[in-house]
Image: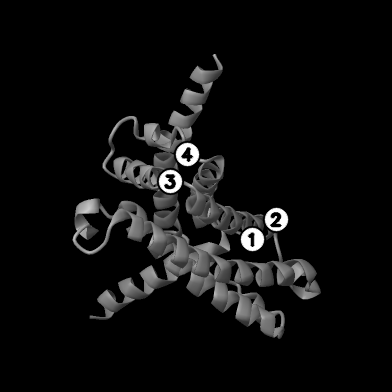
């Protein structure tokens, strides 16, 4: 019974849930950009405080998290045939450990500074909603589990690292039973994956939306001008 329940849970969390998260994200993105443009704004706390830690925290977090995101996309979804002529899978793993550790640590420093500002600055707290607190805590949790996952990768065999890649690529091309690749995956990696998809679901309904909506709106405006 326990084995069957675990199998069902793994199937839901690592096969169906990612598609649900992607669907909610895309629907929310389309709605916020096309129907609710006035609400898509950063409402930056820099206007509420002159604390230099805000600027430092914001810059460190934004630049680092972009690099982490790009690393995740190319690291997980790049098929072996695309890079095998340049590097081995072990070299790829070492690069992922180094780059993930570096930019993950920078992102952690940035989100800590932003959390301190959110929870300690009186003016910022007065303008903060429950969603503001929830998302910053969730992102902090995501960064921490990502760094913990990096330490797990260091200590794990190459096969464990490659299984996560195979899972992501199978999911991307809609192969059935992709969750089978994660059966023996460390719980830290599993928590990090699930947390990431939770962030994807709530992303369009938080202030994080400006990170995607603003560039899209600028691109659309450039076409209209032409």
Mark 2 burial class by Cα count in 10 Å: few <14, some 14-19, many 20+: few
Mark 1 burial class by Cα count in 10 Å: few <14, some 14-19, many 20+: some
User: Can you tell which of label 4 and label 2 is closer to the viewer?
Assistant: 4
What distance separates the C-alpha of mark 2 from that of mark 3?
41 Å
Where residue 119 sits: x, y (%)? 76, 66
User: Can you tell which of label 2 and label 3 is closer to the viewer?
Assistant: 3
| Left or right: residue 225 compared with residue 25 | left
**Residue 157: which numbered mark, if any?**
3
What distance separates the C-alpha of mark 2 from that of mark 1?
10 Å
What distance separates the C-alpha of mark 1 from that of mark 3?
33 Å
User: Can you tell which of label 3 and label 4 is closer to the viewer?
Assistant: 3
User: Sequence order check: which comes first, mark 4 or mark 2?
Assistant: 2
Q: Secondary structure at mark 3?
A: loop
Identity of the residue drawn at 47% across and 61% down: 36
What distance separates the C-alpha of mark 3 from that of mark 4?
11 Å
Q: Secondary structure at mark 4?
A: loop
Identity of the residue drawn at 26% across and 62% down: 87
User: Can you tell which of label 2 and label 1 is closer to the viewer?
Assistant: 1
Mark 4 burial class by Cα count in 10 Å: few <14, some 14-19, many 20+: some
Residue occupied by mark 1: 136
User: Sequence order check: which comes first, mark 3 or mark 4?
Assistant: 3
Residue occupied by mark 4: 185
**Residue 196: which numbered mark, if any?**
none
């Amino acid at each position: 019974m326990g084995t069957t329940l675990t199998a069902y849970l793994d199937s839901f969390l690592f096969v169906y849930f990612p598609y649900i998260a992607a669907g909610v994200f895309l629907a929310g993105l389309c709605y916020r950009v096309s129907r609710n443009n006035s609400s898509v704004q950063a409402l930056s706390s820099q206007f509420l405080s002159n604390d230099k830690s805000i600027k430092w925290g914001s810059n460190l977090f934004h630049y680092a998290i972009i690099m982490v995101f790009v690393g995740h996309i190319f690291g997980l979804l790049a098929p072996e045939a695309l890079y095998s002529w340049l590097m081995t899978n072990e070299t790829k793993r070492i690069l992922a450990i180094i780059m993930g550790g570096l930019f993950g640590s920078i992102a952690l420093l940035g989100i800590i500074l932003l959390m301190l500002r959110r929870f300690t600055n009186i003016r910022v707290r007065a303008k903060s909603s429950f969603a503001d607190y929830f998302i910053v805590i969730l992102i902090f949790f995501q960064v921490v589990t990502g760094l913990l996952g990096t330490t797990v990768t260091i200590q794990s065999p190459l096969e464990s690292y490659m299984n996560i890649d195979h899972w992501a690529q199978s999911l991307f091309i809609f192969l059935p039973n992709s969750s089978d690749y994660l059966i023996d995956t460390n719980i830290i990696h599993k928590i990090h994956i699930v947390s990431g998809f939770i962030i994807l679901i709530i992303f369009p309904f938080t202030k994080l939306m400006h990170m995607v909506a603003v560039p899209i709106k600028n691109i659309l405006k450039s076409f209209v001008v032409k």
